[in-house]
Image (cartoon, rainbow, N blue to C red):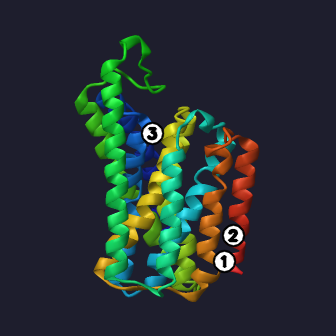
Amino acid sequence: MPWVLSVLGLVILLLAGDALVKGAVNLSLRLGVPALIVSLTIVAFGTSAPELLVSIKAVLDDSPGIALGNVVGSNTANILLVLGVPALLATMHTSECSTRKTFNMMIAASVLFIGLAYRGVFDFWAGFVLLGALAYVLYDMYRDGKEHRRECKNAAAADLEEPEGADPDMPGWRIAVFLVLGLVGLPLGAGLLVDNASMIARAYGVSDTVIGLTLVAIGTSMPELATTVMAALRRQADVALGNVIGSNLFNLLGIIGIASLVGPIHVDPEFLRFDLWVMLGASLLLIPFVYLGRDINRIWGIVLCAVYAGYMAAVLI
């Protein structure tokens, strides 16, 4: 039965990811906000809901390894797996996206997160710092979105670019339905997948930390993967890359920030020796796509997936 429910969770994730991409892209068109900004907020936070639910539950169940491993493993998977797999299906033209600012924020958030981890515990004060940083990120995104809308009002209608695949005539209620289906279906599908995958793993005597870094991290990254695959197939590279960067920001600042207010999260020394640095290294792999104008093609997809496979082997051995 757990295997059947795991497959059902994957199916729900794929359908919900498609609905969320449709809703987010058309919402960006309706509001006059770039698809990138919408993907950095609505899509990214919506697809990070499973990580939030899993981490809070893990803290309440006194399983800090799952809580921290979930976030660190998910951020690593978001870059190597979530961007790697879609690139095997279709080239993502990320050279056309302007993500330098948000990428810099993600790197800064990663450094801040690692610095706080060296305190040995994510407690109330660490949560306060992380949530304060998240508040700044959200304010900055709001300011950018507001500036873009002002520019659109001053531009000629012929000069305005519409996100590819968007439907200018889509009614508001349909956009809302797509968003609701995506935001509700993603955590539901991820919950089915993670719970049943964890049951299977525990039957084989795997530790909480390893479960958090592998099965739970991959499971909770499935919403990002589903959303990014659909975005890549629809040639919405801005949604794909923005989803990953925004999700990683929210994972680091929001999820652990909120979870640490529920209870202290003690840091396993192994995270400090290896996993946190792999997470940061994976983030730095985005430099060619963000700063050098490279597209994420199939070759890069193979490289990213191979690096992730090597990381999984190192964790499991």
Residue 227 visible in the snapshot:
no
Q: Name the one closer to the observer, 183 or 128.
A: 128
Q: Which SS class for mark 2?
A: helix
Q: Residue at x 53, y 54 (%)?
A: 104
Q: Are marks 1 and 2 in contact (CB under 8 Å)?
A: yes
Disc on the earlier residue, 3 or 1: 3
Disc on the earlier residue, 3 or 2: 3
Residue 264 visible in the snapshot:
yes
- How far apart, in angstroms, are the residues tagged by discs 3 and 1? 33 Å
Residue 300 appears at what percent x and percent y? Answer: 73, 47
Residue 243 appears at what percent x and percent y? Answer: 47, 48
Q: Are marks 3 and 2 in contact (CB under 8 Å)?
A: no
Q: Residue at x 31, y 59 (%)?
A: 135
Q: Name the one closer to the observer, 91 or 139.
A: 139
Q: Quadrant of residue 247?
A: bottom left
Q: Residue at x 60, y 59 (%)?
A: 283
User: Disc 3 marks which residue?
Assistant: 36
User: Disc 2 marks which residue?
Assistant: 311
Residue 188 appears at what percent x and percent y? Answer: 36, 59
Q: Which SS class for mark 3?
A: helix
Label tally: 3
Task: Work out whether 288 lies above or below 168.
Answer: below
Q: Which SS class for mark 1?
A: helix
Please, what is the three-letter code of the amino acid marked with disc 1?
A: Val
User: Disc 1 marks which residue?
Assistant: 315
Task: Work out whether 109 lies above or below 60.
Answer: above
Q: Is residue 233 left or right of residue 274?
A: left
Q: Quadrant of residue 64?
A: bottom left
Q: Residues within 10 Å of mark 3 (few under 14, many from 20)?
A: many
- How far apart, in angstroms, are the residues tagged by discs 1 and 2? 6 Å
Q: Name the one closer to the observer, 250 or 299.
A: 250
Please, what is the three-letter code of the amino acid marked with disc 2?
A: Tyr
